[in-house]
Image: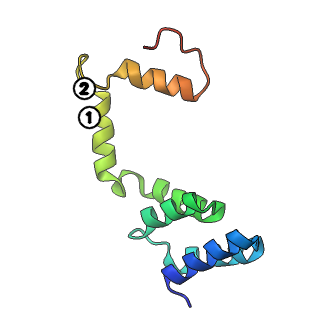
Amino acid sequence: MTTQDDLQQVILVADKFGFWRLKLVVEAELIRRHLVEDTMVDLLLFADQSNCMMLRDAAMNMASANGNASFPLLAMSTKTALHQPRGSRINRRTMDCCSSTIMNRNTEGCF
């Protein structure tokens, strides 16, 4: 019972019934055996959906260590969004406004 799918199912059941120690042990096993660059995004999404903090942190650490090499399309789309012309759908002012809203800064006059 060491396939990635089996371990994910055990995590879901352990979470459902409140077996947090079992959940942590299985998370550690999932990280040790199955967290590689090819499965990183899938495991990150699973960890976020199932509240697996240790798995999420490990996947995020792997993603940040790999930098833009893991997410080349995301890096390219971010550059494109930041450098669109003024009349475009998303401009720099809109992005700054969204950032300030997220960080609870003053947002008067954003939109």
**Residue shown at 41% from the left, 25% from the top:** 95
- Crowding at dot 1, Cα within 10 Å, few <14 / some 14-19 / many 20+, comes out as few
Q: Which mark is residue 103?
A: none
**Residue shown at 39% from the left, 21% from the top:** 94
**Which percent across, then down, holds residue 107?**
54, 15
**Which percent across, then down, holds residue 98?**
47, 26
Verify CB contact (< 8 Å) between mark 1 and mark 2. yes
Q: Which image quadrant is residue 51 in?
A: bottom right
* Figure check: 64 above or below 101: below
Q: Which image quadrant is residue 25 in?
A: bottom right
Q: Which image quadrant is residue 23 in?
A: bottom right
The quarter of the rendered structure image containing the C terminus is top left
How is the rendered protein coloured? Answer: rainbow
Judge by depth and name the residue closer to the eye, 5 or 17.
17
Q: Mark 2 falls on what kind of element?
A: loop
Q: Mark 2 highlights which residue?
A: 84
- In this rendering, does residue 28 appear at all? no
**Which percent across, then down, holds residue 21?**
77, 74
**Residue shown at 33% from the left, 38% from the top:** 78
- In this rendering, does residue 92 appear at all? yes
> Which residue occupies the extreme front position in the image?
16
> Which residue occupies the extreme bottom position in the image?
1
